[in-house]
Amino acid sequence: MQRRLSGIGQNGPVNAEIDLERLTLLDPDVSDCPYAAYDALRREAPVWRDNATGMFVVTRYEDVRMVLTDTERFTSARHRGRIDPRSARLKKIYEDKGWLPGATLAARDDPEHREMRGLFNHAFRPSKIKEMDDFIVDLAHSLIDEFIGTGECDWVRAFAVPLPLIVIGRQMGARDEDMWRIKAWTDAWVHRLGMMQTEEEAVWSTEMEIEAQHYFQPIFERLRREPDDTLLSDLVNTVIPEWGRTLTDNELHAEMMADTFVGGSETTTNALAEGVRLLIENPGEWDKVVKDPDRYVPLLAEEVLRLEGPVQGLFRTAAVDVELHGVTIPAGSVVNVRYGAANRDENQFECPEKMDLDRENVRSHVAFGFGTHHCLGAPLARRELIIGFRALVDRVDKMWFIDGANDFRHHPNFCLRALKHLHIGFTAR
């Protein structure tokens, strides 16, 4: 099955030959600009078995929402049979040198998921998030202070990375001066999540994570002796009533990478970066934001999340045989729920490839998932995006891409979408 179609890439319209019999979302070029492939899949094969991974990929908006809410037929726990040699090698490295990560919140089904989520809901309660606003505002402006006088910057490195990383780092007991060291650890973890590594690269990622574990283990132990008002102190010391215990070290280490530093910084970084790229490409939308920031900055955050979802897709497992659009998904199969494709479904969003801050249903995107596993860090991510974009509007008048400095490439990754760099010029207000 092959068709030629038009889509919108990071630099405007693209044409691509889509051969569904040979396509894989693991192709770095497809990963870099997947939207033509998503369009073909939604129209021609809404339930499609990836040729490289064997996963069943679901791309239509209504189907994605159905899979995310049907927790009986599509489970979050990954039920593995025989462990493959590569996984066994990584497991031994964890056991010999660090802590084998426990099951994360995202990898649990109810009732364990509900019971564990209660702990996170307490740690990330709205009042706790609200308390961070002043710090985030001050941080956003202090980061801009560092480059505003130069008239240009790499927006990714100068602002999009440090803003959420410093925020979550403060709440996880890390020192600001260790930010780029922590960034290296999260990058390594994200590369393994992206499923495009060789075995030796996966070993490197594992050893980088173990390095992070040894950094955070003394922080866990200190917080057990001396609790404070950070989010991590809550996670370390709060007893889950149904379990009769706090999280173990193995569980804490898993959460530090998956749900706090990666979930709490990488995704916001990616949205902050893509947002500025989209605003430069859409000057009419930038004008709207500048003229009425109170109205349009929150809408900007939502439209960026819809158009360039930081998380392109995550996983479920079919608990039983499921028939969908004439395709049988056998029990035990891995299902890839493709948020990035659903958010550009023309049956849900009018002219889905276009940036439109007046879009009436902009908040109906599934960038944060849907249902019981809806992203627990969504309130913090939204606050960081709104505050970050508002600081940009307050400090910058006009923006443009630095000629010849950008290739607009993304890190190869099956799950996440992250610009490598974004070199911009600007005039200050």
Image: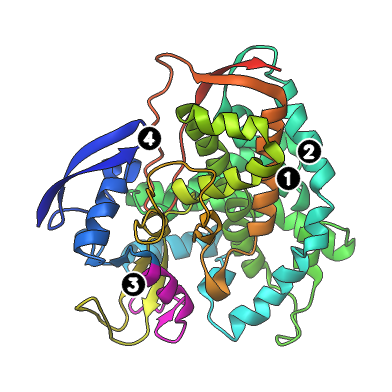
In-image side of 345 versus 390 (left or right): left
Tell me which segment is drawn in magenta: 62-82
Q: Tell me the crowding category of disc 1: few under 14, some 14 to 19, or many 20 or more residues within 10 angstroms, Cα based.
A: many
Provide the residue designation for mark 3. Answer: 334
Q: CA distance from mark 3 to mark 1?
A: 34 Å
Q: State the residue in front, 135 or 317.
A: 135
Provide the residue designation for mark 4. Answer: 10
Could you tell which of marks 3 and 1 lies nearer the N-terminus? 1
Q: Nearer the viewer, mark 2 or mark 1?
A: 2
* Mark 4: amino acid: Gln
Q: Which mark is residue 167?
A: 1
Q: Secondary structure at mark 2?
A: helix
Q: CA distance from mark 4 to mark 2?
A: 29 Å
Residue 242 seen anywhere in this rendered image of the structure: yes
Q: Are marks 3 and 1 in contact (CB under 8 Å)?
A: no
Q: Are marks 2 and 1 in contact (CB under 8 Å)?
A: no
Q: CA distance from mark 4 to mark 3?
A: 29 Å
Q: Residue at x 33, y 45 (%)?
A: 31
Q: CA distance from mark 1 to mark 4?
A: 28 Å
Provide the residue designation for mark 2. Answer: 137
Q: State the residue in front, 288 or 331.
A: 288
Could you tell which of marks 1 and 4 lies nearer the N-terminus? 4
Q: Secondary structure at mark 4?
A: loop
Could you tell which of marks 4 and 2 lies nearer the N-terminus? 4
In-image side of 27 versus 232 (left or right): left
* Mark 2: amino acid: Val
Q: Nearer the viewer, mark 1 or mark 4?
A: 4
Q: Nearer the viewer, mark 4 or mark 3?
A: 4
Could you tell which of marks 2 and 1 lies nearer the N-terminus? 2
When the figure is inspected, residue 14 is found, relative to residue 358, above or below; the finding is above
* Mark 3: amino acid: Val
